[in-house]
């Protein structure tokens, strides 16, 4: 057999098994796959069929290790495991592989490893503790479901007897580590209390193969989404190095794949908790849309998000997904940058300096001081101006009197509205005198300009229709070029944090048509004040909303703790309804988060430095520290430097450097992820801020909104962790930690 056309794939489960091997063995595996693809029959590889198996073979990786491979066809092979040579031949009858009849994917299980690691007997009891009066047989966790029901849900048939023997949660989590993915998802959903029919509908049905499955056709099975494989050299190198979380950042679960390729009749939205792959879906959706474009050199697809840091991350990930060819058809821009460019195109003379929200609030305070007004709160007025007046494009006092203020909390009388309107007019005049503008003003102006552009396009379309399809070039050629919508498709990441004006602008930038807008986001992670109802802004997602519920990043233990932080708060669905994280789950398992109570802030910083030192060889770039304020970030970095630990503060554009522990406020960690996460300063008065607690009686509605936002911020920080989470505080802990402290008391200081 010549090797030039040999395909060699690596099964996802083998990928994770290889990560645990010594580094020299990983290097040998990388060399092995090159040799195998060149000539599988090379004498040095010692390729041979294993006794009792028609498809399973072994091949030499090095003197000590062997690769186990399924022969899918003459020239198509799949690595399913890498074992020490002494473990390969001892239990050949315990190695099972099959095509799942539900998903059509290839599943490989080593029953001997499952037996030893999951169902191994407990340590012998002492004579005094042995033999209770009456032997008690523990009840199986899955005694309520028959073998037929489990296999109908997609549980691997070879594992059904093992499932029947599970009696503890630890055993279940151990099995999930070795089981095929659908088996793990089904068992965890049943264990978490879901009804059989719900599991069938929500877990099994979305990943079912669309066509009948031939259980003997392994090559066809390898091509289905349910068989998660690595094939490229770069992807294999990444899997072997294991220094990054890149592997899960690019693969599509079958549930996600269906959302990516679906043909939508209008705007669509995908929700889901942290780590469920919403951004992955957005990136693959972009590629799907690009693949269906006619040939050309323009960029008819927009990929946008709410800040510069995340936009840069989207660009790098899209480049990794499809290279320069894919990027050449996509415009990637954060939404404020897009709005600013739109305004400057229309108003090239507008070069006002832009101020952020904090500076705008300071200008409100200065205005109130100059006017001697002490009956109004600057933050309240700023929110009223941005959320109601600008947010609803209110241009007159009369319109403001009629404007809806849903969700604003405090009611205002007609005379108070008159006062607010007058103050808002003075505030805008003040900004003009200073030669500055806010991002809210830019967004609203851009929305107005794009809406006007859309109206002109629609007018031209009506005239063309009336003229029997003929163009009026004098009408169409208004600015030296044919008037058209800016984009054919728009994909939005982190949709929950966009302003109402952003949505109005985006709606006007693409024609209302099939697959026009595709949004991903989670309102539980909203860290800004921009609550919107998309339907009122011309974006109707009713009937085209989906939710992802399986986390690929955060362990089950960290996930439980993070959900406790959210409490019983109600969150919206971006369209006037409610949204929950019911069913949100993980198949990953790890340690329970550690809680640390310290005497003061200085003690916290010293304890954090000691903890990082205890982690030894963990790459510092995979460690992050989130704190409530910028000053606390700087102080933490200083303390770490005293211990010889380099720290990088995260700014608006991301980490300021290449290597070191990442430190920043909780706001800065949106969209990022780390092997080990530390959240420090989670003290009452800091999380939430004392000023928020003070509004409990003076402005109850605003208090509830601000408390929810503070919970979301802590939730975001906690769910950046993959392997471990440590939470520190001094003095009184944040009220958001009450349930965590009750379940798991803090470690001794």
Image (cartoon, helix red, strand yellow):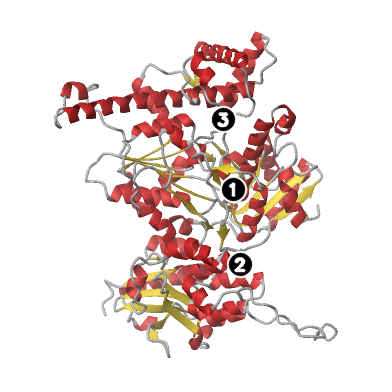
Helix, strand or loop at mark 3: loop
Lower position in the chain sequence, tag 2 or tag 3: 2
Tell me: 610 left or right of 429: right
Q: Count all numbered tags in the image, as a single digit.
A: 3
x and y percentages locating residue 155 in the rendered image: 50, 73
Residue sitting at x 25%, y 25%: 459
In this rendering, the label closer to the viewer, 1 or 2? 2
Q: Viewer-proximal residue, 686 or 42?
A: 686
What x and y, as percent, mark residue 683? 74, 41
Whether residue 154 is visible, yes or no, is: no
Q: Which residue is mark 1?
A: 660
Q: Where does the N terminus fall, quadrant-wise?
A: bottom left
Does label 3 or label 1 sit earlier along the sequence? 3
Q: Is residue 747 left or right of residue 111?
A: right
Q: Nearer the viewer, mark 3 or mark 1?
A: 3
Q: Quadrant of residue 387?
A: top right
Find numbered disc 1 in the image and state the secondary structure of the residue it sits on: loop
Measured in 3D between alpha carbons, the distance from the residue under mark 1 to the one under mark 2, in whole angstroms, is 40 Å
Mark 1 closeness class: few <14, some 14–19, many ≥20 residues within 10 Å: some
Q: Which residue is mark 2?
A: 191
Q: Which mark is residue 406?
A: 3
Q: CA distance from mark 2 to mark 3?
A: 40 Å
Residue 593 x %, y % = 68, 56
| Label 3 crowd (10 A; few <14 / some 14-19 / many >=20) | few
Camera-side mark, 2 or 3? 3
Please report contact status of discs 2 and 3: CB closer than 8 Å, yes or no: no
Q: Residues within 10 Å of mark 2 (few under 14, many from 20)?
A: some
Q: Nearer the viewer, residue 464 or 160?
A: 464
Q: Is residue 309 above or below residue 141?
A: above
**Counting residues from the N terminus, which is met first, the one under dot 1 or under dot 2?**
2
């Amino acid at each position: 057999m010549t090797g030039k056309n040999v395909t060699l794939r690596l099964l996802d489960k083998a990928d994770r098994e290889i990560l645990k091997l010594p580094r020299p063995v990983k290097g040998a595996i990388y060399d092995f796959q090159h040799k195998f693809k060149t000539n599988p029959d090379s004498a040095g590889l010692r390729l041979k069929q294993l006794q009792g198996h028609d498809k399973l073979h072994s091949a030499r990786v090095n003197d000590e290790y062997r690769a186990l491979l399924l022969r899918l066809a003459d020239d198509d092979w799949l690595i399913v495991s890498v074992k020490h040579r002494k473990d390969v031949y001892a239990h050949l009858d315990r190695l099972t592989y099959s095509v799942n009849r539900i998903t059509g994917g290839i599943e490989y299980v080593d029953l001997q490893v499952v037996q030893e690691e999951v169902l191994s007997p407990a340590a012998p009891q002492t004579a005094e503790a042995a033999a209770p009066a009456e032997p008690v047989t523990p009840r199986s966790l899955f005694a309520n479901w028959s073998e037929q029901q489990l296999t109908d849900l997609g549980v691997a048939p070879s594992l059904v007897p093992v499932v029947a023997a599970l009696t503890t949660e630890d055993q279940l989590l151990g099995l999930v580590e070795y089981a095929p993915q659908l088996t793990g998802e089904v068992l965890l959903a049943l264990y978490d209390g879901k009804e059989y029919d719900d599991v069938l509908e929500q877990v099994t049905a979305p990943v079912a193969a669309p066509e009948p499955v031939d259980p003997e056709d392994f090559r066809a099975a390898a091509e289905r989404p349910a068989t998660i494989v690595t094939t490229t050299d770069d992807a294999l190198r990444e899997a072997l190095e294991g220094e990054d979380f890149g592997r899960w950042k690019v693969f599509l679960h079958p549930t996600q794949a269906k959302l990516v390729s679906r043909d939508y009749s209008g705007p669509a939205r995908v929700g889901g908790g942290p780590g469920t792959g919403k951004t992955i879906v957005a990136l693959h959706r972009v590629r799907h849309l690009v693949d269906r474009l006619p040939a050309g050199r323009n960029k008819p697809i927009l990929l946008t998000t709410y800040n510069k840091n995340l936009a840069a991350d989207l660009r790098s990930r899209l480049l990794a997904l499809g290279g320069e060819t894919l990027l050449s058809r996509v415009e990637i821009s954060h939404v404020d940058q897009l709005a600013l460019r739109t305004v400057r195109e229309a108003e090239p003379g507008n070069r006002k300096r832009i101020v952020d929200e904090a500076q705008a609030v300071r200008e409100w305070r200065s205005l109130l001081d100059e006017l001697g007004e002490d009956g109004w709160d600057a933050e309240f007025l700023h929110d009223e101006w941005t959320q109601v007046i600008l947010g609803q494009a209110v241009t007159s006092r009369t319109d403001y009197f009629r404007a809806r203020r849903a969700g604003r909390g405090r009611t205002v009388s007609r005379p108070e509205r008159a006062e607010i309107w007058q103050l808002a007019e003075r505030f805008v005049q003040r900004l003009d005198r200073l030669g500055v503008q806010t991002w809210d003003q830019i967004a609203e102006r851009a929305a107005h300009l794009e809406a006007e552009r859309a109206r002109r396009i629609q007018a031209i379309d009506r005239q063309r229709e009336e003229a029997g399809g003929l163009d009026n070039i004098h009408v169409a050629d208004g600015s030296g070029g044919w008037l058209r919508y800016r984009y054919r498709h728009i994909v939005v990441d982190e949709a929950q944090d966009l302003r109402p004006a952003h949505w109005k602008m985006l709606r006007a930038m693409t024609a209302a048509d099939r697959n026009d807008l595709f949004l991903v986001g989670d309102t539980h992670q909203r860290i800004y004040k921009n609550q919107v109802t998309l339907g009122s802004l011309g974006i109707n997602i009713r009937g085209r909303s989906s939710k992802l519920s399986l986390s690929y990043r955060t362990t089950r233990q960290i996930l439980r703790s993070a959900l406790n932080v959210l409490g019983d708060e109600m969150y919206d669905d971006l369209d006037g309804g409610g949204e929950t994280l019911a069913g949100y789950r993980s198949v990953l398992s790890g340690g329970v988060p550690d809680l640390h109570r310290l005497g003061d802030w200085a003690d916290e910083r010293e304890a954090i430095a000691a903890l990082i030192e205890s982690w030894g060889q963990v790459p510092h770039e995979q460690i992050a520290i989130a704190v409530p304020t910028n000053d606390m970030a700087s102080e933490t970095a200083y303390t770490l430097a005293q211990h010889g630990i380099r720290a990088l503060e995260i700014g608006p554009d991301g980490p300021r450097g290449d290597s070191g522990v990442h430190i920043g406020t909780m706001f800065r960690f949106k969209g990022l992820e780390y092997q080990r996460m530390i959240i420090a300063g989670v003290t009452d008065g800091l999380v939430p801020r004392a000023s928020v607690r003070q509004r409990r009686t003076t402005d109850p509605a605003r208090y509830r909104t601000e408390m929810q936002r503070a919970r979301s911020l802590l939730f975001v920080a906690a769910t950046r962790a993959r392997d471990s989470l440590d939470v520190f505080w001094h003095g009184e802990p944040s009220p958001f930690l009450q349930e965590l402290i009750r379940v798991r008391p803090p470690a001794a200081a």
